[in-house]
Image (tube, rainbow, N blue to C red):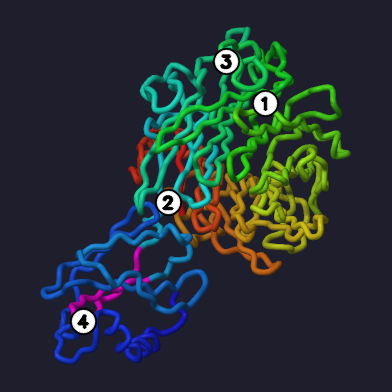
Amino acid sequence: MRPSPRPIRLAALLLGTPLLLSACGGGSSGSNGGNLAAPSGFSVGYNAKSYQFSWSATPGATRYELVEDPDGASGAQSEATVDSTITANSYTHALAGQLLHERINATYRVRACDASGCGAYSAAITPDVSKAVGYFKASNTGRGDGFGISVVLSADGSTMAVGAPGEASKATGANGDQADDTASGAGAVYVFTRQGSGWSQQAYLKASNTRLLTNERGYPYSAQFGARLALSSDGSTLAVGAPREASNTRGVNGDQSNTDTPGAGAVYIFQRSSGAWSQQAYMKSSNTAPVAEYRDDIAAGSYVVNAAMFGDGVALSADGRLLAVGAPGEAGNATGGGAVYVFTQGTSWTQTAYIKPGATGHDGFGFGRAVAFSANGQTLAVSGGNSVSLFGNDGTGWSVQSVLTGSNTEFNDRFGNQVALSADGGTLAVGAPGETSSGKGINAAPGPRSLARAGAAYVFTRSGGAWSEQAFIKASNTDQDDEFSHSIALSADGNTLAVGAASEAGSSTGLAGNQADNAAGGAGAVFLFQRSGNTWSQRSYTKASNTGAEDAFGSSVALSADGKTLAVGARAEDSLSTGVQGNQADNTANNSGAVYLY
């Protein structure tokens, strides 16, 4: 609510009237600007992170002035001009430069002006900010597609890629036939772009070797193309992980045709040129197993064991020329389970490093489950073995800088399930969605370990080469099975942190809902935190605009570099709609998935 009464602000506006009139074209002497009627019919419509204001034309007006009183999450603020040069009787106000929760209480007014002055303001309106939440669906929405299991944003927030590893088209490459559903679990990636204040789908991407996979026993097998994504800063280089891809080839651009090693995994590199996307490289590990190892089980049937899962973690440097790929199931001869492969782009892509957990001094089961680069690619974070290893590269090779565990870490916490680095590599966020303590808030006592899979997040900072824990973060409504930190994202400066709790049970919608309500099990939520100096505070509690039980909102999160655009995936959302801002009320496509923009 507005903390200060309106009369005080009106008084301030009256004192500032000469300045406002001057901005509209001069004083009132001999003018009729001050006599222009206030515009009637002032109303607002909505699109993804934008308002569409309209009003009736005022006779004699040559332009209009729109002002905003932005009171929101940060408290009382001064009214300010949005635009004083509007010549039509409508205006699109883009909110790309601000998080939606910052405009919860914002009000807007418009007035008419002519060459000599401006008239009275219209009555203020307060838009329903929840209606400006972006709602994105695939162009070929289908049941079980899992659209939103992964999401990434370019630095400026104008390009967004979304993975749907369950999508079933047999198409290959860019913008193929979306209607074919004969390759169950092949996977797809959708690229959306913002032009001005409007969003549209730019590309539909498939693997170059899409196919319906069956293992040697004839059981269907999913490649999971799109399960993991990484995007360069300019949004023009995209790495797509397919951790269950089946070829046994090795290296870059090898033979894609065989299916001898389900679960070996692959990464595909796509590049954009003049708005068109094409595949640039097909990446495999340098030690792909020649054949898969199977095991038979009475209950589970035949399944692959010791799958390397190359592509289960992917990261790109800001310029998109350095790629890190995690293979948490890799079982090479070096110490420990899992590996990370680093590739560098010169005239072509080449593998330049093979990193094993033994180099850290820790036997890291699952090493490579999550990876993150600093912007320049000289700091690399790798999770595994309930720890996170930090590597640095001084130009002569990779060496371990530090191995981190949380202040409240236990074996089943899944510490390192997700990791995120700031652009300078000096702030690290780590998810532990299996953490069980009952505490709430930031740097509070953890409390008893009585809430299975409640989850926690940790923030570490580097000073003089030494890392230390800065914050131990719990949800403001900690509860069992919420899996707080299932997903995490950091802004470039490390001062904004988004934490997804994909199993949180609140039934509210939009922003600033009731956190105590637990009527929608598995609906999911996202919590936004900001740092000032060394102090973190929670800034918002964010829900889907169409919250539903088991939607898994918070399956993935992404932030623009400035932290002003937040994308949230809900891999199990059920609407059958397609495209941007479609019908959210339809629930006939189970687990099709959606992405929301704030």
Magenta segment: 107-127
Point out the residue furthest to the top here.
217
Where is residue 42? Give x, y as percent: 23, 68
Label 3: few (<14), some (14–19) or many (≥20) C-alpha neighbours in 10 Å = some
Marks 1 and 2, the one that precedes in the sequence: 1
Say what amino acid the circle numbered 3 marks.
Gln
Where is residue 154? Give x, y as percent: 51, 47
The image's mark for residue 511 is none
Quadrant of residue 118 in the image?
Answer: bottom left
Quadrant of residue 463 in the image?
Answer: bottom right
Q: Residue at x 79, y 51 (%)?
A: 406
- Does 335 appear above or below 445? above
Task: Report how far apart the C-alphas of labels 4 and 2 lie in the structure.
Answer: 38 Å
Say what amino acid the circle numbered 2 marks.
Ser
Which is more toward the observer, 477 or 370? Answer: 370
Q: Residue at x 38, y 39 (%)?
A: 201
Q: Which residue is mark 4?
A: 119
Marks 3 and 1, the one that precedes in the sequence: 3
Label 4: few (<14), some (14–19) or many (≥20) C-alpha neighbours in 10 Å = many
Marks 2 and 3, the one that precedes in the sequence: 3
Q: Tell which tag, 4 or 1, sits nearer the viewer.
A: 4
Asked if the residue at tag 2 contacts the one at tag 4, i.e. Cβ–Cβ closer than 8 Å, the answer is: no
- Does 257 appear above or below 320? above
The image's mark for residue 256 is 3
